Amino acid sequence: MAGFTIPNAPDTDKSTLDQSEPDRVDFEILGNRRKGVVSGAAVTVVSGNIVAVASGTIAYEGTDYALSANASYSLSSAPSSGNRFDLVVARYATSAVTIQTVTGTASSTNPVFPALPAADIVLAAVLRRANESIVANDIIDKRAFCLASPGTTIDWSNVTSKPDPVITLGGDLSGSVTLTDLGNGTLTATIASNSVALGTDTTGDYVESLVAGSSITLTNNTGEGATPTIAVNVDFGENDQIVLGTQVFG
């Protein structure tokens, strides 16, 4: 990504060195940090008086705004004599930014940039030569890049090389999920085997074990999934009686 440029004289059209001369507007662009280009918005030549402007994000007075692309944006006709500078700008108005042109004044000796309206963010300066079409070297990048405004969001669809973080559970849980392009994902958690200790990791009543009383025999009394067996070891004689509550048997 290029950005704000004042070209060296050998890199300009040798017929005019006006592009390599710093202009008052150059200093205004660099000195105003309350507005600028966050991403995109490059200006390129198409043909004739037509340029293309890429979509991008523009920061203006603490807020970021999306700039829609225009693949065929027409500038004013070239001057009939002398040279002229036109500015391609992103203009803020009513909570939005749009592509606009600020047309300069032709001069046969020393053309300068037109005055810059306060709500404009310069994207490019275009040298307009008398009766000639725009060529690539006529467009000088004037985008002053800046960070996204605090408290605003970036259009995620314009972000490249998005991360793919992986979330993995540990401890008594297992499971993982990959958030492709930092998008949404569903994490299914599974409780690890033998990770829940009754009485330690649980609340409420439960039976830990059975204790055999007098004349009682317990078998299969411990272990996960155990089924205890209770046996009563009592020998009854011929004349013995059993008393249950108020009932007497035998």
Image: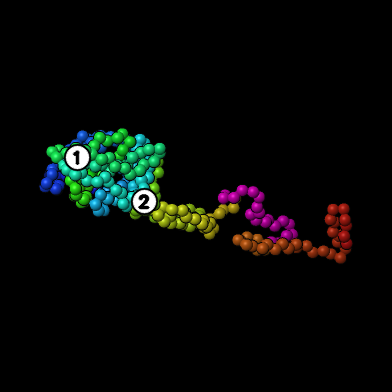
What type of secondary structure mainly makes up the magenta span?
Answer: loop
Q: Closer to the N terminus: mark 1 or mark 2?
A: 1
Visible residue check, residue 5: no
Q: Mark number for residue 158?
A: 2
Residue range (magenta): 200-218
Looking at the rendered image, the quarter that the C terminus falls into is bottom right
Q: Residue 98 appears in which quarter of the rendering?
A: top left
Residue drawn at (27%, 50%), measured in percent from left and top? Answer: 50
Q: Residues within 10 Å of mark 2 (few under 14, many from 20)?
A: few
- Residue holding disc 1: 106
Instruction: Give the residue furthest to the bottom.
Output: 238
Q: Mark number for residue 36?
A: none
Q: SS class of the residue under badge 2?
A: helix
Query: Relative to residue 163, is residue 3 drawn left or right?
Result: left
Query: Relative to residue 243, is residue 63 drawn left or right?
Result: left
Q: SS class of the residue under badge 1?
A: loop
